[in-house]
Amino acid sequence: MYKDITDNQLLDLIKENDEVAFEEIINRYSKKLNTLVATYKPKCLKLGLDISDVYQEGLLGLIEAMRTYDEFKDSTFKTYANILMERTIIDAIKANDNMKNKSLNTAVSLDEVDPSLNKDLYSKLELAYNIDDKLLEEEDEEEVRRTLTEFELKVFELKMDGKTNKEISIILDKTPRSIENTIQRIKQKIKETLQK
């Protein structure tokens, strides 16, 4: 239906919530996205990253390009979209690599800890890694919600809906760093509430 119209015309239709135009842009750029994913596949496999997750990150870059492209300020949409798709893929790879390095560099051997403290240490580690599960099991979700600011509450609800940090940053029009910082504050408030 929209095969003969330009990217810019499609973007205008997307602003009017035209889902067919949205799908057409996705189809037009899927080959380029697949090429980008294939380019970074060896690095991803080395880091243990799931290729479908990397593809999704690139797709988020394309969606971000659709949302933020300005034909008067930016070059062609094609160039802009390619840059954002590649940038989100690279960011995902770097973030994964940094997380692996961080856990290796901050690891503490449980063998070096006083054995009498091991049980307490394990329970604290379990709490840190299972906050979402704990919330679902506990009946104090409302108490947690009352401690959150309006923005934290939005982030919390999106996270509970299964959104990734990247998706939340796009939805709320904030930087990924801002979302990560907010999630850390939320986790701290949850932890404090659950330990009461």
Image (cartoon, rainbow, N blue to C red):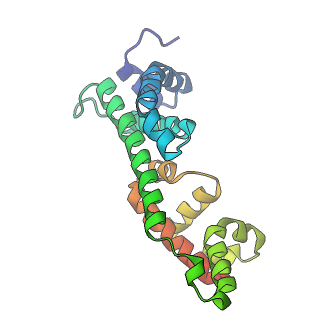
Q: Is residue 33 left or right of residue 135?
A: left
Inspect this view and state whether residue 147 appears: no
* Nearest to the observer: residue 195 or residue 39: 39
* Nearest to the observer: residue 86 or residue 44: 44
Q: Residue furthest top?
A: 4
Inspect this view and state whether residue 72 appears: yes
- 171 is higher (above) or lower (below) than 189: above
Q: Quadrant of the C terminus?
A: bottom right
* Nearest to the observer: residue 169 or residue 9: 169
- 112 is higher (above) or lower (below) than 187: below
Image coordinates for residue 49, horizontal then vertical, percent? 52, 44
Please report the residue visible at 53 percent of the width from the left and 24 percent of the height from the top: 23
Please report the residue visible at 55 percent of the width from the left and 27 percent of the height from the top: 19
Please report the residue visible at 48 percent of the width from the left and 13 percent of the height from the top: 2
- 190 is higher (above) or lower (below) than 177: below
Image coordinates for residue 164, horizontal then vertical, percent? 54, 51
Image coordinates for residue 48, horizontal then vertical, percent? 53, 45
Please report the residue visible at 56 percent of the width from the left and 72 percent of the height from the top: 187
Image coordinates for residue 65, horizontal then vertical, percent? 38, 35
Report which quarter residue 153 is drawn in: bottom right
